[in-house]
Amino acid sequence: MQGANPCLWHNLGEIMREIKVRAWDKENKAMLYPDEEQFIWYGSKIWLQVCWPYNKSRNKDVRIENLELLQFTGLKDKNGKEIFEGDIVQYTASDMSSTNIGTKSKHKIFFDNGAFLIEFPTNKGEMCGLDLRVYNQSSEIISNIYENPELLER
């Protein structure tokens, strides 16, 4: 970039993450995975190139209000699988100071206040969000809140 501070530009490059999105189609109850073609917006409609399980590739016109867009967090679980908003992960406690080492629990991934968080219950029974970057390597994706919401029933 002409006129840009090369050190600043380099530092920005280090913190950038790959932008990926998937979408939950509320009408058809299906998760849509766009391929390399990105979302193209047309007013209140969105055009997706999606890969469907029953058909190798198919274009589908989908109304934006029927979609729940879910961002890639930029992080992977302990198996190297990409973590998205709305995923349900199984966390295995690994904190050496904890008496719960090895205990497994299920948690939802969400985005709030500019950060990707993992939902944990507090001692008072309320829910709070903790920084996913601390927990992703001790977690494994098991599903998502759209296809298997019952996994989070407590």
Image (cartoon, rainbow, N blue to C red):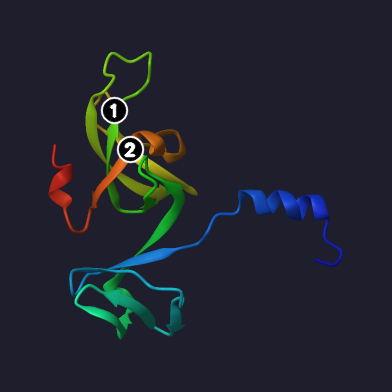
Q: Which residue is mark 2?
A: 139
- Counting from the top left corner in percent of width and height, residue 46 is at 38, 81
Dividing the image into 4 quarters, which one contains the C terminus? Answer: top left
**Disc assigned to residue 73:** none
Residue 93 appears left or right of 132: left
Closest to the observer, 14 or 120: 14
Packing grade of label 1 (10 A; few <14, some 14-19, many >=20) is few
Residue 80 appears left or right of 4: left
The residue positioned 35% from the left and 40% from the top of the image is 118
Q: What is the CA distance from the residue labelled 2 to the residue labelled 1? A: 19 Å
The quadrant where residue 54 appears: bottom left
Packing grade of label 2 (10 A; few <14, some 14-19, many >=20) is many
Q: Is residue 97 above or below residue 150?
A: above
Which of the two discs, 2 and 1, labels the residue nearer the N terminus? 1
**Disc assigned to residue 122:** 1
Closest to the observer, 140 or 120: 140
